[in-house]
Amino acid sequence: MATLQAATTSTGAVVTDAQAVRQLCEAHCFGTLNWEVDEEGELIIWGYDAFEVYEAREDGLPDYEGGLVTHEFLRTLAGYLEPNEELDIQTAGFTKCRFPVLAKRYVIRDGEVLHADLSSLDLIDV
C-alpha cells in the first residue's frame, strides 16, 4: 500500500480577533499540521500533511465520523480576516515513485473562500 506524503504551507493573514481565531482552530483538528496566531494577529498554517479539517472531539482527537469540515471551517475563518487580507493555503502530495496525486489550494479573500485542485486550474467559490 502506498503512503501519501504531503506538505502544506500558507501565506500569513492578519485576523480581526486573534483569540476567537485561536479558539476556532483549537476546536478543530488539522492532522499533523501546525497553526499559529502570533502577537500581531497573523495566522499561518504549515506542516507535512494534507490540509483537511475535522471537528475536535472532547478528547481532542478528530471526529472522523462527522466527516471533513474544511469548507465550513474556512467560511467561518473568512469572517475574521482583516479587510484586504488574503490567506492562501496550498497542499501538494504524492505517493512513492508517482506523479503528484494531491494538489489543493484554498484562498480566502474579500470574505470568499475559493478552492482549486489538480483537475481544475480555476479558483471556484466553495
Image (cartoon, grey):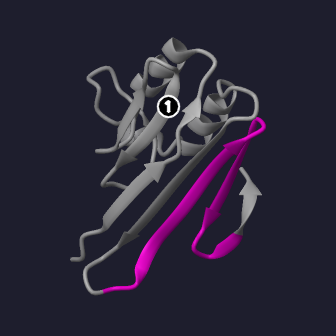
For this view, does 97 lie left or right of residue 82? left
Magenta segment includes 96: no
Q: Residue at x 67, y 33 (%)?
A: 78
- For disc 1, the marked residue is 43
Magenta segment includes 116: yes
The vertical placement of 119 against 62, above or below, is below
Residue 116 visible from this viewpoint: yes
- Name the secondary structure under disc 1: strand
Give x and y (percent) for residue 47: 33, 49
Image quarter for residue 2? Answer: bottom left
The vertical placement of 55 against 108, above or below, is above
Q: Residue at x 36, y 59 (%)?
A: 7
Residue 51 visible from this viewpoint: no
| Amino acid type at image mark 1 | Leu
Q: Nearer the viewer, residue 90 or 53?
A: 90
Crowd tier of the residue under label 1, counting other residues whose Cα lies within 10 Å: few below 14, some 14–19, many 20 or above: many
For this view, does 31 lie left or right of residue 75? left
Q: Residue at x 28, y 32 (%)?
A: 61
Q: Residue at x 43, y 76 (%)?
A: 101
Give x and y (percent) for residue 44: 46, 37
What are the residue bounds of the magenta stretch? 98-121
The vertical placement of 46 against 81, above or below, is below
Q: Nearer the viewer, residue 36 or 54?
A: 36
- Looking at this rendering, what residue extends furthest in the front direction? 40
Q: Report the number of discs.
A: 1
